[in-house]
Image (cartoon, grey):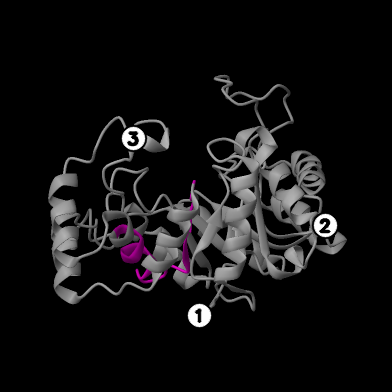
Amino acid sequence: MEYRQLGRTGLRISPVVLGTVNFSSYTNEADSFAILDRALELGINHLDTANNYNAGRSEALLGRWLAQGGGRREKIVLATKVYCKPREWGDTDKGPTGPNEHGLSAANIRAAVDASLERLQTDHIDLYQTHHVDRNVPWEELWQAMEVLIAQGKITYVGSSNYAGWHIAQAQEAARRRNSLGFASEQSIYNLANRSVELEVIPACLDYGMGLLVYSPHASGKLGGRPDSNEGRRAIQERHPKADAYEALCDEVGHPPASVALSWVAHRPGVTAPIIGPRTMEQLEASVEAIDIELDTETLRRLDAMFPGPGPAPEAYAW
């Protein structure tokens, strides 16, 4: 497996990231452990979670896996996120239970990182990502809080997630004024059906030397092929309007729709690695194989015609 440098940092990660959002919910602990072990065998070294995935249970499951030892912690780049307060599974109230229990205030960052470290059963997080922009927190407060965590050895790198291009610029310029590295990476949604990051997020990441980790490469399953009803997962309520034409093209090139979608995004300019969230071992194996698929120029042209991108900014919306 050919490892990739995370932005301008010296950190090297696998060309696919193992996301754990399904662990402890759709995938039980034994199967999750087996997938994690197999991922290591395949060379995947970057694991991604968040403090609010399944009310913190995904972090806790990952912590129990790490606690087995065998060099697991030393072999991985561990990433988690801060912003939301962990909620119980099925809780429809997305609001916080207290005024300082969510967001990116220094107070919440301090409390959240300690809670994540306890659940993960580790003494440090390699990539600590802000799960969303917090418009109520000045950049100086964010960077001061993160610099304290770095000095304490609790985190190594800081990343952003779901940021607009101008948020990235603001944050990185604020970090530059503090002689700080700033964000090492951005994590954004990106797939054939949603290419909005091509407007300004990808150019911002390239300009500031940030890695780009992308989630939902299958457009929440809409471009992953017809769902297998035997898996017992929630049925996909709405197929993409172009799904039939897309699946016909995939048949022509001889690869499953999920593999084509993943290969396409993995090789896009500026993308460091896509994040996969396998529920089964078979999905993990198929995703790793898809990274090595190289789509030819004609297939890429047809995909662009079927799912046109927005083009560069500002030409996309101006003369």
Residue 167, image x, y percentages = 51, 53
Residue 229 numbered tag: 3
Three-letter amino acid code at the position of disc 3: Ser
Query: Which residue is at 14% across, 59% downward?
Result: 249
- Along the polypeptide, which appears first: circle 3 or circle 2? 2
Q: Mark 2, mark 1: which one is toward the viewer?
A: 1
Residue 16 on image: x %, y %: 49, 65
Residue highlighted by disc 1: 2
First of labels 3, 1 by sequence position: 1
Dot 3 alpha-carbon crowd within 10 angstroms: few under 14, some 14 to 19, many 20 or more: few
Residue 319 visible in the shown view: no
> Looking at the picture, does residue 169 appear above or below residue 28?
below
Q: Name the secondary structure under disc 1.
A: loop
In the rendering, at what x and y percent does residue 312 appear?
A: 28, 63
Mark 2 closeness class: few <14, some 14–19, many ≥20 residues within 10 Å: some
Say what amino acid the circle numbered 1 marks: Glu
Residue 200 falls inside the magenta stretch:
no
Give the residues drawn in magenta, as a range: 261-279
**Residue at screen point 19% across, 46% down:** 243
Who is closer to the viewer here, 300 or 144?
300
Looking at the image, the residue that sits furthest to the right is 152
Callouts 3 and 2 close, C-beta under 8 Å: no
Helix, strand or loop at disc 2? helix
Which of 295/280 is in front? 280
Q: What residue type is labelled 2?
A: Val
Inter-mark Cα distance, 3 to 2: 49 Å
